[in-house]
Amino acid sequence: MMDQKQFLAALGFAFTAAWIGFNFGSAVLCLVGAGLFYAAASFAQGELDLPEIQDRLRGGSQGRSGGAYGAQPGTHAPRVR
């Protein structure tokens, strides 16, 4: 199994090869297509939670206590001197 560094190195190599073989626009299109298929496979395996992603993109915290990062909105930690 490949780790993240090896996967990104292979992706960088494939992007560079597509850029040389075709042009920059086609290489970016290959990356977009690969990302879409990766997201589809993650969704099919249950690793991708679409409602959570939508909530994060909207920046909303409806129905949860705390803001997007767990702190109550408008509260600040005391400053230490």
Image: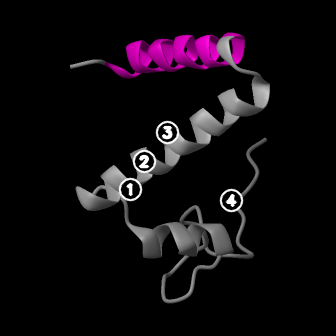
Residue in the image at 67% along x and 27% along y:
27
Residue in the image at 45% along x and 76% along y:
51
Kindly identify the amino acid type of the residue bearing the numbered disc 3. Answer: Ala
Whole-angstrom CA distance, mark 4 to mark 3, is 43 Å
Residue labelled with disc 2: 37
Residue in the image at 41% along x and 20% along y:
7
Question: What mark, if any, has residue 34 been given in the picture?
Answer: 3
**First in residue order: circle 3 vs circle 1:** 3
Q: Is residue 50 left or right of 67 when viewed as pictured?
A: left
Q: Are marks 3 and 2 in contact (CB under 8 Å)?
A: yes
Tell me the quarter of the image containing the N terminus: top left
Whole-angstrom CA distance, mark 2 to mark 1, is 5 Å
- Identify the secondary structure beneath mark 2: helix
Q: Are marks 1 and 4 in contact (CB under 8 Å)?
A: no
Residue labelled with disc 1: 40
Q: Are marks 2 and 1 in contact (CB under 8 Å)?
A: yes
Q: Position of residue 43 (x, y in %)?
A: 33, 60
Q: Residues within 10 Å of mark 1 (few under 14, many from 20)?
A: some
Quarter assignment of residue 10: top left
**First in residue order: circle 4 vs circle 3:** 3
Q: Residues within 10 Å of mark 3 (few under 14, many from 20)?
A: few
Whole-angstrom CA distance, mark 2 to mark 4, is 43 Å
Question: What mark, if any, has residue 27 been given in the picture?
Answer: none
- Identify the secondary structure beneath mark 1: helix
Quarter assignment of residue 77: bottom right
Q: Is residue 8 magenta?
A: yes
Which range is magenta?
3-20
